[in-house]
């Protein structure tokens, strides 16, 4: 596999790279976002705007704090608008729903006002959360469209409701995860139990062991176990999930990210939540987030994008870049402000996942 090209500082090459995806019928910038609450994600939003045709940007961590964010050129809405790209906001973060992003803007008093003919900027909701005191007037001019957000929780809900064939009496989903999953299941009118319900957010008891073993504690209508990032994972939830699957429930996962970045380090990701079940069952779940091609197919169907004119932009080789490569996208661009680093780009090996090109930070594209 050829080594990825380093683009930072090469103005002509960067322009040529971006222009490859400048098709008026397929202007898509795909970005990935993991934690909207964190300043580390804000930079991705601008990137998406800058390079609309540049596909899914992963959880890029361009800025790690408010001060550094304010100093980054990619946060200039005027510069971003000049690229005139449309974006699709793709995230493996299952803890938040598409509607959660829009609600955050409303709660902060930032209306989704459209006062110009530019493409919708999904990522500005993220920016608003961190930089409202500084960018309020600018942010007011950008509308947020939740339809442009495509997350792993929504992907799972679509898969369960429209693709998976379940018996009429086995259509309930047992959830290990947060409200983002529950909200997206509700949007598809899918009954679910577990999740954030207080009845499963507790220690297991001797009575639980007996009732789970006998089946009396199990809902007979459960036909799917869906596992995502769960900040309240416990032994009871894992026990219930295991026995539902042993009794025939379909084993699904929103995504298999082993870690997630936060506060300049890594923490357990959704894949770490499902791994105990994988060890117990001896098999993997069907994953519905990046790099799953089930998610790619769903995105293509929803947005009618042209794969050859779409570029995946991300900071994680094993999810974002792999997602773009296996999906047959026209390009993949890695940024070094997140999980994957320069040494990963320069490593030797035929089986390694490598992007077409990479830059130090997303702002380097604004030349």
Image (cartoon, rainbow, N blue to C red):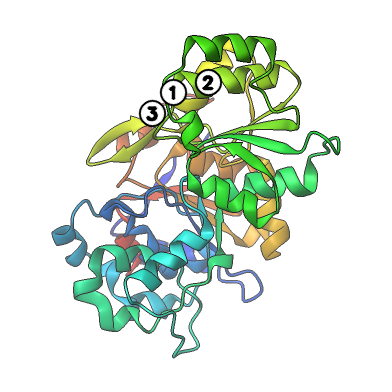
Q: Is residue 189 visible?
A: yes
Task: Tell me the mark number nearer the camera, choosing from 3 and 2.
Answer: 2
Of marks 3 and 2, which one's residue comes earlier in the chain? 2
How far is mark 3 from mark 1, CA to CA? 38 Å
Secondary structure under badge 2? helix
- The image shows residue 6 at horizontal and vertical percentages of 36, 48
Q: Nearer the viewer, residue 350 or 69?
A: 69
Crowding near the residue tagged with mark 1, few <14, some 14–19, many ≥20 C-alpha atoms within 10 Å? some
On the picture, is 157 further left or further right than 118? right
Q: Which mark is residue 347?
A: 3
What's the residue at 38%, 84% (across, down)? 141
- The image shows residue 189 at horizontal and vertical percentages of 70, 53
Q: Is residue 20 visible?
A: no
- The image shows residue 48 at horizontal and vertical percentages of 44, 64
Q: Nearer the viewer, residue 201 or 10?
A: 201
Secondary structure under badge 3? loop
Q: Residue furthest left?
A: 67
Q: Nearer the viewer, residue 258 or 97?
A: 97
Mark 3 touching mark 2, by CB under 8 A? Answer: no
What's the residue at 30%, 33% (across, down)? 266
How far is mark 2 from mark 1, CA to CA? 7 Å
On the picture, is 92 further left or further right than 240? left
Mark 2 touching mark 1, by CB under 8 A? Answer: yes
Q: Nearer the viewer, residue 241 or 4?
A: 241
Label 2, on which residue?
238
In the picture shown, does residue 359 fall above or below 225? below
In the picture shown, does residue 201 fall above or below 135? above
Secondary structure under badge 1? loop
Q: Which mark is residue 234?
A: 1
Crowding near the residue tagged with mark 3, few <14, some 14–19, many ≥20 C-alpha atoms within 10 Å? few
What's the residue at 71%, 45% (across, down)? 159
């Amino acid at each position: 596999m050829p080594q990825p090209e380093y683009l930072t500082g090469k103005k002509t090459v960067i322009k040529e790279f971006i222009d490859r995806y400048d098709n008026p019928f397929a202007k898509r910038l795909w970005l990935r976002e993991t934690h909207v609450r964190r300043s580390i994600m804000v930079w991705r939003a601008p990137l998406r705007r800058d390079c609309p045709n540049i596909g899914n940007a992963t959880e890029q961590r361009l800025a790690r704090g408010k001060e550094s964010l304010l100093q980054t050129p990619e946060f200039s809405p005027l510069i971003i608008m000049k690229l005139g790209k449309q974006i699709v906001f793709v995230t493996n973060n299952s803890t938040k729903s598409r509607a959660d992003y829009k609600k955050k803007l409303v709660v902060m008093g930032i209306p989704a006002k459209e006062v110009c003919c530019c493409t919708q900027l999904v990522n500005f909701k993220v920016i608003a959360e961190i930089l409202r005191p500084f960018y309020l007037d600018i942010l007011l001019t950008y509308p947020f469209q939740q339809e442009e957000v495509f997350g792993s929780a929504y992907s799972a809900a679509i898969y369960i409701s429209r693709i998976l064939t379940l018996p009429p009496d086995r259509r309930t989903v047992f959830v290990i995860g947060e409200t983002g999953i529950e909200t997206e299941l509700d949007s598809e009118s899918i009954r679910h139990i577990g999740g954030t319900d207080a009845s499963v957010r507790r220690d297991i008891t001797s009575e639980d062991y007996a009732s789970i073993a006998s089946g009396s504690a199990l809902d007979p209508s459960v036909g799917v176990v869906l596992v995502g990032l769960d900040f309240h994972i416990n032994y009871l939830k894992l026990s219930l999930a295991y026995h539902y699957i042993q009794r025939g429930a379909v084993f699904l996962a929103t995504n298999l990210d082993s870690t997630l970045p936060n506060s300049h380090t890594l923490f357990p990701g959704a894949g770490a939540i499902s791994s105990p079940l994988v060890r117990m069952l001896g098999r993997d779940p069907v994953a519905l987030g990046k790099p799953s091609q089930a998610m790619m197919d769903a995105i293509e169907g929803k947005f009618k994008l042209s794969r050859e004119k779409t570029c995946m932009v991300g900071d994680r080789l094993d999810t974002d870049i792999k997602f773009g490569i296996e999906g047959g996208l026209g390009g993949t661009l890695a940024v070094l402000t997140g999980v994957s680093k320069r040494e990963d780009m320069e490593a030797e090996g035929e089986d390694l996942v490598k992007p077409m090109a990479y830059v130090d930070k997303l702002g380097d594209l604004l030349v």
